[in-house]
């Protein structure tokens, strides 16, 4: 590191091409930086785990510029160039760090021969399970065997026999025969999940992955071991034997479990989600996510989904229902219970509606215990969004007692509730009967049952939109599957309500249009910001004074309130 | 015996009345060198060891003084000394003799070395099977501690260092420097990757660590006694000091014999010192440095150039027993385990035996060794069970080539070299094996011969 905190670059030569990479970058990453699909094959190396160097797949040839041992002068060849002293044996790329003048060969005969050899060794005892293996299609061993396998086997002996279905924990099953002993799962458990339960027993070719006696792999991060397993040794009990991965469509999404906003990938086919896996974002979740976050999609097909626009319990066309809602809102004395589960765009609309009806907006906090990693105390994905859009100005309370008083006193005659069961939050059902109730939500509950008007909304997997996470990072998600038939995206329904309230004709809005308005009206968002301008890795916002609010989150993987305060103090001091 | 041994480390070892207690050791002038050492400057001792040119006796033959020089002294972290007493190389049995019969020599050598490198704590990592040796060492350390030869403020010098004896749990890989360190820390003995974990900088508990063989540490005592330059005069330049050759196999008098480096030839060792082969037998092959070193064929001619530029043209009996000469003929002096085979030996069976050992001992951490070595074992096992194929020799050689040089530690080489050298020198026997079995099968007999393989 140089003095200003940035890493200095060094020039190394990869296959005859000079490349600038940050000093100390390992060769696997350096080669990736060259681009053009160049890759050093590897199994045990993982960018977020310590270096084990045991798979030997990333062997490369390395050389340094030669210097005379006595004088320290550069040794030159006939052309006057500095000679390269190549190492006599291939070295592993994962444990070789870029140093000035280093030369690398990634496709020489020795390197290719080494990879072919490692591939052959890994395959001799590997079962021919591909036709029934869940990893098939996303298996590193399968991929590299295609590149480096010999196409026939020289191995005529008996393969090793090991346990085929060991239960490591409630969500993970181990097939020991498939295991290539790369130790990624062991290192993950020790280094990331901080739950040291996995290890190897027995020696040599009989080495077997196992849980320590009396322990099991049951922590809330156990499924990450399945993700990082380069072969089909660790499989998820949930996904096992359900679907071939090549049939699945991948959609980028955001986890709604907590304010961490882990980047995810949704794997779906024909309108059905099969699994959710983490997507790498070094500013948010690295390459991990919680097990509980992966299970959130299970409520998509539950029986209590709201699937019809209704007035008084009767199914009506959406325009008619929206018009009825407008009429109620125009009646005055309106209060709104908004949601931190809504997307930024929806919150922007609720804010517009609240302004146009002069309503008081309440929001309820949903807090739980944080785990210091990727599950924060705030169990909503978009509280920061409600603050940024100006829907609310302060942190929410845990219940709605003040709203209950207003209803009781008759100050509130119409209530718009978004995705909350207010009967559990201090407003008794009999009190709820005193007001006209509009409910917007995904699933039915006691409040929805009381509602005069019900507007079903789409779940995060079914719509496009964005959230703002704990670090004020704006992140967008895409629809992976279609919603219940006939249900429009929330922002389109809300346009049908918000526009008439200002005596405008509802426009056929798209997210691009919504974002034009957001960019013009929301203080914390640049006026040039567009929907398409939010990248796949999100966009950090400058929250200004909002960051001073006493948020409930404590330190976790990428959130550090104390460090934030220190940098603020330092900035203030340097200005002063 | 035509040639008299010249013992240095084993000087008193088998003398009548010499026992392994401290009184006997002191009577024979023991601990004088430690008394002398603590009055010297540590860096002077290091310089003496450097001058002596003593090379590691564990197998690799790396100069000990150089190893000490690489020690990272600037880190501010404590320095550790570890004695590698995990003598596991098949054919080697020298360290055990030292531990059993002269433990105080090792303790003195260790304390001199510990003082020289200013170690905070010293360990003896002793092979798990050496239980008696462990008890002897524990007693010897207690005796030395009572006399203030180790522990707090040794001999009033202000330097403190203690020795902890740690028993292994029976694995060959624990003799590998970094595997030993992992084991000492309480983990599986999986060798570490180098870089970055060079013991001299990031060794035991990530602190600078020196790991030396038992015999090497004993040599330090004698270097202090006679001075580095004087020690270097034993043997030849670059091959200083004495070596203990552990001769086993088909000789009349197997055992351990100590000679200065290059003082005798392999032929003298076998025929004069060990009394030759059994009557009526002919020499077939010799493994000169423990089972992992490459085999030498009796009727080979070894020609080439030595390091110092002189040409040589030797038969197997002319090879001088030292580091460089054995290296020059394509093998190594290794740990000094000379395994002699006469013409009754079936080379396929011999290799099957060696492969069995290495397949059993591979730690299983890195792919080529974990998968390749048991594969080689399965092949040789099949060959002696009567299912040899003519192409097996080439296959074995190809597997060995795919392992050597691509593993985390030197085990890959240790397991490949026997295969490579057996195939290079006795390929005809491997091919003949297949033909012989085919012929027997054709004649309706059992294809496999009865073997004595474990």
Image: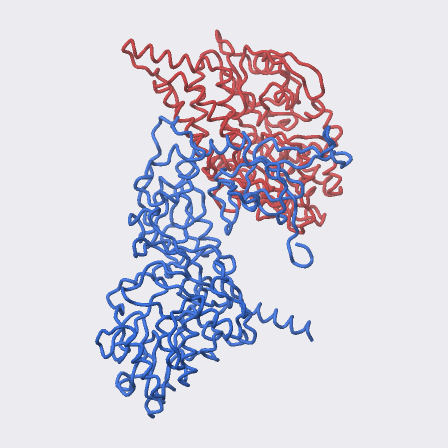
Chain colours: A blue, B red
Asked if residue B344 is positioned above or below residue B413 in the image, the reply reads: above
Q: In which quarter of the image is the N terminus of chain A?
A: bottom right
Q: Where is residue A7 in the image (x, y as percent from the top left)?
A: 64, 53
Judged left or right of residue A561, residue B454 is left
Give the percent coordinates (x, y) of residue B43.
Answer: 74, 41
Please tell me which residue lies in front, B354 or B423: B423
Give the answer, above or below, for where A272 lies relative to B23: below
Residue A236 position within the rendered picture, expressed as x and y whole percent measured from the top left: 34, 51
Q: As drawn, which residue projects farthest toward the left? A: A314
Q: Quadrant of residue A480 in the image?
A: bottom left
A7 horizontally vs B350: left or right: right
Horizontal arrangement in the rendering, residue B449 relative to residue B75 (left or right): left
Q: Residue at x 56, y 46 (%)?
A: A33
Quarter that holds the C terminus of chain A: bottom right
Foreground residue among B48 and B11? B48
* Residue A226 appears in the figure: yes
Is residue B51 in view?
Answer: no
Residue A104 x/y as whole percent: 60, 37
Q: Note whether B241 is above or below B267 in the view shown.
A: below
Front-most of residues A81 and A52: A81
């Amino acid at each position: 590191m140089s003095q200003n905190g940035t890493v200095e670059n060094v020039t190394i030569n990869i296959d005859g091409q000079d490349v600038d990479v940050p000093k100390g970058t390992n060769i696997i990453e350096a080669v990736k930086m060259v681009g053009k699909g160049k890759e050093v094959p590897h199994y045990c190396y993982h960018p977020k785990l310590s270096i084990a160097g045991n798979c030997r797949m990333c062997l490369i040839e390395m050389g340094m510029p030669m210097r005379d041992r006595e004088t320290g002068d550069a040794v030159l060849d006939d052309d006057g160039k500095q000679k390269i002293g190549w190492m006599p044996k291939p070295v592993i790329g994962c444990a070789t760090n870029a140093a000035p003048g280093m030369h690398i060969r990634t496709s020489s005969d020795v390197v290719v021969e080494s990879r072919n050899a490692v591939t052959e060794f890994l395959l001799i005892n590997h079962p021919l399970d591909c036709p029934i293996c869940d990893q098939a299609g996303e298996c590193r061993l399968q991929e590299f065997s295609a590149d480096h396998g010999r196409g026939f086997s020289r191995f005529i002996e008996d393969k090793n026999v090991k346990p085929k279905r060991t239960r490591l924990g409630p969500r993970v099953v181990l097939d020991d025969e498939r295991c290539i002993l790369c130790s990624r799962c062991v290192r993950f458990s020790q280094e990331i999940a901080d739950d040291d339960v996995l290890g190897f027993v027995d020696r040599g070719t009989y080495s077997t992955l196992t849980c320590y006696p009396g322990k099991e792999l049951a922590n809330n991060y156990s499924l990450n071991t399945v993700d990082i397993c380069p072969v089909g040794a660790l499989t998820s009990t949930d996904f096992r034997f359900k679907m071939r991965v090549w049939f699945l469509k991948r959609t980028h999404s955001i986890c709604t479990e907590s304010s961490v906003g882990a980047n995810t990938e949704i794997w779906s086919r024909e309108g059905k989600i099969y699994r959710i896996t983490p997507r790498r974002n070094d500013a948010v979740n690295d390459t991990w996510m919680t097990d509980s976050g992966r299970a959130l999609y299970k409520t998509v097909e539950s029986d209590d989904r709201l699937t019809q626009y209704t007035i008084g319990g009767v199914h009506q066309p959406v325009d008619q229902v929206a018009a009825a809602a407008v009429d109620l809102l125009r009646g005055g004395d309106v209060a709104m219970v908004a949601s931190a589960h809504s997307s930024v765009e929806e919150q922007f609309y609720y804010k517009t509606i609240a302004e146009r009806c002069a309503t008081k907006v309440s929001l309820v906090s949903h807090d739980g215990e944080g785990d210091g990693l990727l599950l924060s105390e705030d169990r909503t994905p978009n509280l920061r969004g409600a603050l940024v859009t100006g829907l609310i100005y302060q942190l929410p309370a845990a219940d709605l007692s003040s709203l209950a008083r207003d209803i009781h006193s008759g100050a509130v005659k119409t209530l718009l509730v978004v995705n909350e069961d207010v009967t559990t939050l201090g407003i008794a059902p009999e009190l709820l009967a005193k007001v006209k109730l509009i409910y917007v939500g995904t699933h039915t509950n006691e409040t929805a049952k009381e509602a005069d008007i019900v507007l079903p909304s789409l779940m995060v997997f079914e719509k496009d939109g964005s959230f703002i996470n704990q670090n004020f990072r704006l992140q967008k998600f895409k629809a992976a599957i279609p919603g219940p038939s006939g249900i429009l995206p929330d922002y389109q329904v809300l346009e049908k309500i918000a526009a008439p309230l200002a005596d405008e004709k509802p426009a056929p809005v798209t997210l691009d249009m919504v974002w034009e308005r957001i960019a013009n009206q929301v203080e914390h968002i640049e006026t040039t910001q567009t929907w398409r301008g939010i990248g796949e890795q999100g966009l950090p916002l400058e929250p200004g004074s909002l960051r001073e609010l006493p948020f409930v989150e404590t330190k976790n993987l990428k959130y550090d309130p104390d460090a934030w305060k220190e940098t603020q103090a330092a900035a203030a001091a340097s200005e002063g | 015996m035509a040639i008299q041994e010249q013992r240095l480390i084993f000087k008193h070892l088998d003398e009548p009345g010499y026992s392994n207690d401290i009184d006997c050791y002191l009577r024979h002038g023991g601990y004088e060198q430690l008394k002398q050492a603590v009055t010297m400057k540590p860096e002077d001792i290091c310089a003496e060891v450097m001058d002596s040119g003593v090379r590691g006796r564990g197998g690799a033959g790396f100069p000990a003084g150089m190893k000490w020089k690489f020690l990272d002294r600037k880190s501010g972290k404590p320095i550790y000394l570890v004695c590698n007493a995990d003598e596991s190389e098949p054919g080697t049995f020298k360290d055990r003799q030292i531990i059993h019969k002269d433990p105080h020599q090792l303790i003195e050598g260790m304390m001199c070395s510990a003082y020289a490198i200013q170690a905070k704590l010293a360990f003896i990592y002793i092979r798990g099977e050496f239980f008696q040796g462990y008890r002897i060492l524990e007693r010897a350390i207690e005796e030395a501690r009572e006399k203030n030869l180790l522990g707090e403020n040794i001999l009033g010098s202000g330097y403190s260092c203690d020795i902890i004896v740690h028993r292994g749990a029976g694995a060959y890989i624990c003799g590998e420097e970094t595997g030993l360190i992992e084991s000492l820390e309480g983990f599986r003995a999986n060798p570490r990757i180098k870089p970055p974990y060079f013991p001299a900088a990031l060794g035991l508990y990530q602190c600078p660590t020196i790991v030396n063989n038992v015999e090497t540490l004993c040599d330090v005592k004698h270097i202090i006694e006679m001075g580095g330059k004087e020690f270097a005069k034993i043997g030849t330049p670059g091959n200083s000091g004495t070596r203990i050759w552990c001769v086993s196999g088909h000789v009349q008098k197997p055992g351990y014999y100590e000679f200065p480096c290059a003082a005798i030839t392999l032929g003298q060792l076998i025929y004069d010192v060990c009394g030759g082969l059994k009557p009526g037998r002919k020499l077939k092959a010799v493994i000169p440095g423990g089972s992992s070193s490459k085999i030498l064929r009796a009727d080979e001619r070894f020609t080439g150039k030595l390091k110092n530029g002189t040409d040589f043209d030797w038969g197997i009996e002319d090879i001088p027993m030292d580091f460089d000469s054995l290296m020059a003929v394509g093998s190594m002096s290794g740990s000094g385990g000379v395994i002699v085979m006469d013409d009754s030996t079936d080379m396929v069976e011999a290799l099957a035996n060696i492969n069995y050992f290495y397949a059993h001992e591979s730690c299983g951490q890195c792919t080529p060794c974990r998968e390749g070595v048991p594969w080689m074992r399965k092949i040789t096992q099949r060959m002696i069970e009567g299912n040899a194929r003519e192409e097996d020799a080439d296959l074995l050689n190809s597997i060995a080539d795919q392992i050597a040089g691509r593993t985390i530690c030197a085990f890959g080489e240790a397991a490949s070299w026997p295969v490579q050298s057996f195939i290079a020198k006795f390929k005809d026997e491997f091919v003949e094996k297949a033909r012989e079995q085919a012929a027997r099968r054709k004649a309706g007999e059992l294809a496999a011969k009865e073997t004595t393989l474990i």
